[in-house]
Image: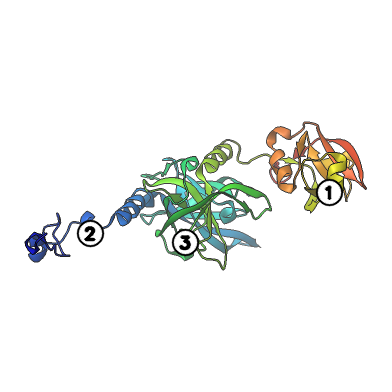
Amino acid sequence: MTNDSVRFVPLASGPNGDPEQAAAGIPPTDDEALDAYSLAVTEAVERIVHSVVHISVRHAAGRSPEGLREREAGAGSGFLFTPDGLILTNSHVVHGASSLEVTLQDGRTLPGSLVGDDPDTDLAVLRVSGEDLVPATLGRSATLRPGQLVVAVGSPLGFQATVTAGVVSALGRSLRSQTGHLLDDIVQTDAALNPGNSGGPLVDTRGRVVGVNTAMILPAQGLCFAIPVDTARWVAGLLIREGRIRRGWLGIGCQNVRLQRRRVREFGLTTGAAPLVLHVEKGSPAEDAGLQEGDILVAFDGQPLRGVDDLHRLLTEGRIGKPALIVLLRRGVRQEVTIVPSESPQTARP
C-alpha cells in the first residue's frame, strides 16, 4: 500500500458525515447530535413523561372547631394508565392518607381519591378527574432480560420529571415489603432512585411501563427495585373491582428455624427448615384449631413449609373459609390439626 492510498478523515463532519458542512459551520440536526444510547433514552422519556404525576400526601392531625386538621405526610410519584384518570403508585406512598393532591406534567393540580391499596404488594390505585389525560402504555415484565436498558421517571425530592437510566440488573429477586410480606419476582435495576421516586414508572426503550419503582437499599448505590408490571396489572384489576386484595389469615406469629437432621429423617420431611409458632392471637383460626406456641409447622394442605413465606403464598383468597390440614411437630411428636383460615383483618371490610 502506498502513501497515496491512505485517506485521512476529519473528526468533525457535517450532518451526513460531510466535512465540507462541518467546515462551513453547518450544525448537525438534533438526532444526529445524539448517539444511539441517548436517542433510546430521550425517545423513551418523550413517550412516558406526560403520563407521570407527582403525588402530595396529607394525613389527619386531629380535629378543630374549623374541621379536620391535616399535616404534610410526604410525597411520591405515580403514572396514569387509563385515559379516564386511574393512576398506579406505591401503597406506602398513599396508605393512610386523609387527602391526596396530584400534579400533572402540564402544571395542573387535581384532587385525588384512593380506589384501593394493597400493602402486601406495595401497590395502590388512585383516581383523578380531568381532561386530556395521557395514559402510559403498559408493557410486559415477563419479557425483560438482564442487561436490558431501562429508564426511571419520577419526582425525587420534589424535582418533577427527573430521568435516570440504567439496566435491568437481575430478575426474580425477593424483597420484604413494609408489612413484612415477601414480594416475589422483583426487578432489580441500577437506574438511580431517590426518595420521591416511589410509585413512578420504570420503562423500556419504547416507553412501555415494565415496572413500578418501589425501593432502594441504602447506603448501597445502584441497588434499586421495581414491582413487575405483570404483577401491577393483576393487582390493579382487583383493586379497581374490589378496592382490596383478600387474603387468608391464621392469626399466628412465626419465625423460621432450622430442623435437626435426625428430625428430618425421622419424620421423612422434604425440607430442613420450617416456621416456628411464636404467638397465637386470641379468637383466631389458629386458637380455634388448637395451635400452640412452640409448634413447628411442616406442611399446610399437603404442601411442605420451608418458612413463613411459603405459608404466606398458600394463604390466598381461595383458602378463606375452607378447612386445611396442618402437619406440625409438637415437643418432638408429629401431629395433624384442621384449620379454617378466615379473611385477614387488614383486608376485611369494616
Q: Nearer the viewer, residue 30 or 57?
A: 30
Which residue reaches farthest top?
A: 322
- Name the residue at 69% across, 37% down: 316
Q: Nearer the viewer, mark 3 or mark 1?
A: 1
Precedes in sequence: disc 2 or disc 3: 2
Label 2 sits on residue: 33
Pointers 3 and 1 in contact (C-beta within 8 Å) = no
Vertical placement of residue 227 versus 224, above or below:
above
Could you tell me which secondary element the residue under label 2 belongs to?
helix
Precedes in sequence: disc 3 or disc 1: 3
Type of amino acid under label 3: Ala
- Name the residue at 54% across, 37% down: 237
Residue 320: x, y in percent? Answer: 74, 34
Label 3 sits on residue: 192
Which mark, by number, is residue 285?
Answer: none
Q: Is residue 96 left or right of residue 319?
A: left
Could you tell me which secondary element the residue under label 1 belongs to?
helix
- Name the residue at 43% across, 57% down: 166
Residue 146: x, y in percent? Answer: 47, 49
Q: Nearer the viewer, residue 94 or 318?
A: 318
Which mark, by number, is residue 261?
Answer: 1
Report how far apart the C-alphas of labels 3 and 1 lie in the structure: 44 Å
Vertical placement of residue 195 versus 113, above or below:
below
Q: Residues within 10 Å of mark 2 (few under 14, many from 20)?
A: few
